[in-house]
Amino acid sequence: MTHVTTTAAETRDLEALLRQAVDGDVDASARRRAEYSTDASNYRIPPAVVVFPRDADDLQAALDAARTAGASVTMRGGGTSVAGNSIGPGVVIDTSRHMNRILDVDPERGTARVQPGVVLSELQKAAAPHGLRFGPDPSTTNRATLAGMIGNNACGPHAVAYGKTAQSTLELDVVTGDGRRLVAGPRTADAVAGLTDLVRQHLALVRTEFGRFDRQVSGYSMEHLLPENGADLARFLVGTEGTLATTLEATVRLVHIAPHRITVAFGYEDMPTAADAVMPIMAHGPHAVEGLDARLVERIRLAKGDGAIPDLPPGAGWLFIEVGADTEDEARDILARVRADAGTEWVRVLDDPREAARLWAIRADGAGLAGRSADNKECWPGWEDAAVPPERLGQYLRDFDQLMDRHGVTGQPFGHFGDGCIHVRLDIPLSESGRPLRAFMEDAAALVASHGGSLSGEHGDGRARGELLRAMYSPEAIALFGQVKALFDPAGLLNPGVVVDPAPLDADLRRPAAPRAGLSSGGFAWAHDHGDLTEAVHRCTGVGKCRADAIGSGSGFMCPSYTATKDEKDVTRGRARVLQDAINGTLIGGLTAPEVRESLDLCLSCKACSSDCPSGVDMAAYKSEVLHRTYRGKVRPLTHYSIGWLPRWLRVVGVAPRLVNAVLKPAWIQRFAVGAAGMDTRRRLPTFAAPFHRSADARARRASTLGVEPGSPRRSASEDQVGGSAARGMRGGGDGDLEGPAGGQIADADATATGDAGPARASAGRRVVLWADSFSDGLDPEIPGAILRVLEAAGLEVIVPDAQACCGVTWISTGQLDAARKRLEDLLTVLGPWAVNGVPIIGVEPSCTATLRSDLLELLPDDPRAHAVARGTFTLAEVLTGRAPVAPSDAWVAPRLDDVTAVVQPHCHQYSVVGFGADRELLAALGATVTETAGCCGLAGNWGTEKGHYDVSVQVAESSLLPALRGAPEGAIYLADGVSCRTQADDLAGVRGRHLAELLAERLPHA
């Protein structure tokens, strides 16, 4: 089976026909087709047209129009299919945009009626007040749609307690492939002419080959049509992957939530041993039994840090068990029985619900995190969710390890051990061809069949495994699938290439078509992607966490513009797909194409995806690189010179800030200046200030070298020693030399770089360098002054460099990477000597601090000073909470904040690169009452000020910031370290923000 390419004329005719028939959106643009050309699988098939129907009648009209045109139809919900069953060559229909209403929740009957595009987490929210939930809960709960779950027969960790989606589906309102609308439910198999007779003719076949164990979902689940199983057409249609009928509406069963739940982790010597313990545990009716391998845990720690996962008991394989009951005593009793039969003494009960939630969140992110191996190789889905009877799981895992060894590949298994379902991503090389993939997949199919298993345990066969169904089913069963397909969809227009007449598993692979896009541009180094932008943009595995309701689910800050528009164009995944297509060069004409700029236009460069995306996508960096390649050596947009060069203009204005403020004070001049700068005229120019670096405080603490020109009379004689003493702080070497980025020694690295003899080497002692970035220096000089006072009150010696240094963050965000590199080189001459000698650098503005800890290394990867600065730069909160090499003196008594109620806005760059944990911990320890916003403020540096962005900027602010400010109690303050966050609140709500340092400084005893 190969898909048919639609000609341009046919596409125009099809688009016109759909526009005439459908009230919803119809889009055949190259950019939209690129966004929908792939899902979370290895495959890429651009559709001819994408349709967003508004209701059931609209959806049926779209189906009728496509059938009239003879065009294939593929349904798509969250687009998170790992098997390639939500992409197709003709019409792709996305119901998540408009058809996302929960029509009814009936707590008495325990049912819900939903449109196909309802996201599962929204249904869970609606059911929760009644003590109910939808039983199955896949890891994509906060972006998977109900129709998508119905298509794939989704399961999740709690399927051991509540069953698969099939067991939770009561009734389906569907349209068959030939246009018949019918209601499917129990005893309705005869609604499809010939179906009951077909089952009757093959009773022995159906009874022996289907429904052999619970997770056998490959192919069609014919067992549901047996008379003894109620001839249930609805349950049968679940898992048919949209190849037989399209869901217009669904009625589903809800189950009661056990009010008392406990999570426990058991450790075993390896994964197969953990699997051997499953059956005794299952005898006690746990609600979830999940497995995690040490290989994936190592990958998580490398990607997220040691603190990303709660402490686990000893072992190299773990089971995570959830038990639940109506009372805590009953739950504890079940837990005791589970522990007695778990077969291990390595156990940890997670009584803290927050810690348990962290554990389950890591498990939920497994598919994305497993997209890279521990040694940073690309890993791919395909053999993603095979299942075997649970009693065979241990031996299957042992055999599977041997299979991986024979093929020279590695994987990081995890999954639903209670159901015998294993997820794994493999580092099969796909960059050149699909041959290694085919060889492995054919052997893996034979292996799982030998254990009586299923190629798919919950994700469907799709394009990845449809061809392999012959390894699992007899030729008679395969023929039966074709006969069933003919009854529902005789023209074969619904999701062609899936299940019946399947496409080759190595056809239409996305990765082999993508050539390297390396470093010739002089942009970022892409150090984590082997110097290849192509590899970087293919980090996107398509799992779609960026589409989640970040505000409602607490899943992070990404993607701010998507929270406002709900358009795939404006989500990290959609942008990644456009970039991938631009590199592949089939729909989008390269990285400089207008479709790429359109796709990236509403990217705020907040960097949240770099932290929240389990695959490590960094769209802010990709956007900078694209802008760099697009405009290098060319005339740029006006805002690149105005806002992009803001630090340069601040230096000019800093000569006479009062005069400039006076000139700009009249409203008409403000509007003229703002418009002339390419900014939205609803924005205002800032009020400029006398620079901090020229203040008396700065001059009194100025120093150009260690041990020379003391800036504070409180320095001790020992701290003034120079020579060969070991530098304290960051990874000191044995003879006063510091380790470089590769473990080598940095010995007087800056002596030549600075053009003089360099700083005398000395112990850092209790010294810190206060770095006032361009924004703090020229707009809010009182903030670095406040930090200075807090640090000195904490018993630290504060040094202000003798030159002001800019990190170039606005040049980076506008893609002026050559200029940014020049500014960072200048910065290293100022800050590098201190960092190399182990003196911590304290940043003020979060975006600038984050730049030194991230982008600096991408632009100057080979400069040892860059590595020293990156690992030696800290925030004020990190110093005060002991996360820096220096800490407050024992005599330091931190000011109390017990009377403070605050709305706190974490800066996106700080959240993403540095982390907000130190600030959160400090505020809690000092007694502040805090409401922490759950998303971006919406200004994001230069982005929110540019023409064309204002309305979306306000919509983003309405996601979290503005409601939090409106709901704050009388007397609450707004705490925001970022200048953008303070500006947004002032512009949109008339609220003046405070920096953490200001709050602390005004409460110091001498203040």
Image (cartoon, rainbow, N blue to C red):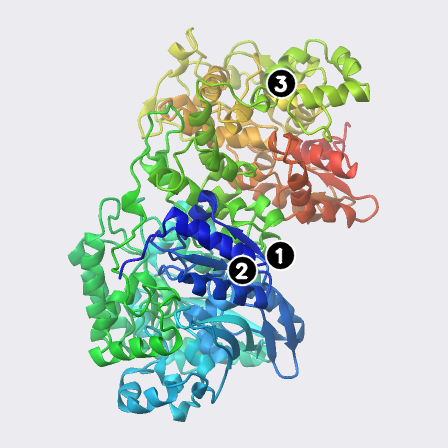
Q: CA distance from mark 1 to mark 3?
A: 50 Å
Look at the picture and state if 92 lies above or below 774. below
Q: CA distance from mark 1 to mark 2?
A: 9 Å
- In which quadrant of the rendered image does the N terminus lie? bottom left
Q: Secondary structure at mark 2?
A: loop
Mark 2: which amino acid?
Asn
Look at the picture and state if 81 lies above or below 673. below
Which residue has dot 3 on it?
714
Residue 191 as seen in the image, left or right of residue 102:
left
Question: Horizontal and vertical percent for residue 46?
Answer: 38, 50
Mark 1: which amino acid?
Gly
Q: Secondary structure at mark 3?
A: loop
Look at the picture and state if 358 lies above or below 964. below
Which of the two residues, 544 or 701, is positioned nearer the viewer here? 544
Can residue 843 be seen here? The reply is yes
Q: Are marks 1 and 3 in contact (CB under 8 Å)?
A: no
Question: Horizontal and vertical percent for residue 534?
Answer: 34, 38
Other residues around mark 3 within 10 Å, as few (<14) / some (14–19) / many (≥20):
few
The numbered disc on residue 419 is none
Question: Horizontal and vertical percent for residue 671?
Answer: 75, 23
Which residue has dot 1 on it?
552
Mark 3: which amino acid?
Arg
Which residue is found at the position 29% from the left and 52% from the top? Answer: 508
- In which quadrant of the rendered image does the C terminus lie? top right
Q: Are marks 1 and 2 in contact (CB under 8 Å)?
A: yes
The numbered disc on residue 142 is 2
Pointer 1 or 2: first along the chain: 2
Pointer 1 or 3: first along the chain: 1
Which residue in the rendered view is the most extreme toward the left?
406
Question: Horizontal and vertical percent for residue 489?
Answer: 38, 73
Which residue is found at the position 30% from the left and 88% from the top? Answer: 207
Which of the two residues, 288 or 284, is positioned nearer the viewer here? 288
